[in-house]
Amino acid sequence: MKVLVTGAGGFVGRWLVPALLREGHEVLGTMLPGERPMEGLSEEERRRTRWRPLELRDGTSVLAAVAEAPDAVIHLAALASGAEARRDPGLAWEINAAGTARLAEGLGALRQERRGDPLLLLISTAEVYGAAPEPRARMEDDVPHPLSPYAASKLGAEVAVAEVARRTGLRTIIARAFPHTGPGQTDRYVVPGFARRLQAARRIGAPVVKTGSLEPVRDFLDVRDVCAAYCALLARGRTGAVYNVASGEGHSLAELFTRLATLIGVRAIPEVDHALVRTADLPHLVGDASRLRDHTAWAPRYSLDQTLQDLVNAQTD
């Protein structure tokens, strides 16, 4: 299968491209114009992956990216930083919602022109659910109530994809990814950020580590398990369905901080810095992935402790 991966140079793409190649797919990866292909691939993986520029704000660029009529597209490319989306909500909507609408439209045109029957796997976010009235695992039939520009723009992408599917017959699947982490994730995100600050505290003997709020509960998956889920959806997901990609287990950020401190071997007291606290942060975000398991037989392979250990090891290297 010829698979186009948008945003292939990002954190998830770094793990998804090799996973697709191992399954025998022909992979085309996109990156922003002027970017260099990502590091971390083996020489063989680099040789087997073809790269294309993609600017989601440019309709001509989008049409050029889909011109090879891929059999499937895994749409990772997005403005994924919640902080950046809050600074410029319009930009988040332009990239995440309008950009996805352009991509879906281009793929729908391929089908209408009988140049293929592509499948679009849209990678959305669990943040579209918003805050639940009580702490429970979220299900795909829950009504979305986004509480951030990032989440709202991703829900806009879902709406755009559904509209194109109804009008053109484009085959689509939506994956709502719950938080995930692992080796190679930038420390702008909470888990690698904790690890980086704890390692610094160990080096200099600092007794205190600044954090944001440690009360939120999150459902963290290993990025490698997330990529396995996307591959499974590509092969066995049902057209038109929405799937949670989640472990079903909740862990407070306080628990994650303590686990990382133990792994790193440092005794440091967390101290909340209000400059690091996210406004409108969701208190509880855990998902029910029964539909994904039932339809694809996917199940996570990495324990949280293994994920954290591998992340720490990668930072140390």
Image (cartoon, rainbow, N blue to C red):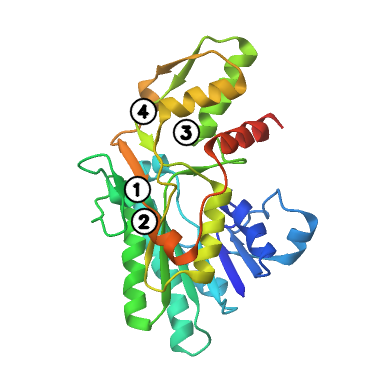
Q: Nearer the viewer, mark 3 or mark 2?
A: 3
- Disc ID at residue 127: 1
Residue 26, x across and y down, in percent:
67, 71
In the image, which disc is placed on residue 154?
2
Mark 3: which amino acid?
Answer: Val
Q: Secondary structure at mark 1?
A: helix
Residue type of the residue flagged with mark 1: Glu
Q: Quadrant of the C terminus?
A: top right
Pick whichever of labels 3 and 2 is earlier in the sequence: 2
Give the camera-side residue of 103 and 205: 205
Give yes or no for contact between labels 1 and 3 (Cβ–Cβ under 8 Å). Answer: no
Q: Which mark is residue 190?
A: 3
Secondary structure under badge 4?
A: loop
Label 4 or label 1, whichever comes before in sequence order: 1
Give the label, 2 or 1, closer to the camera. Answer: 1
Q: Earlier in the sequence, mark 4 or mark 3?
A: 3
Q: Residue furthest left?
A: 133
Q: Residue at x 36, y 76 (%)?
A: 165
Label 2 crowd (10 A; few <14 / some 14-19 / many >=20)? many
- Label 2 close to label 1 by CB (< 8 Å): yes
Q: In the rendered structure, find residue 73 and report the number of the disc placed on it.
A: none
Compared across the picture, whether 118 is left or right of 202 comes to left
Question: Element type at marker 2?
Answer: helix
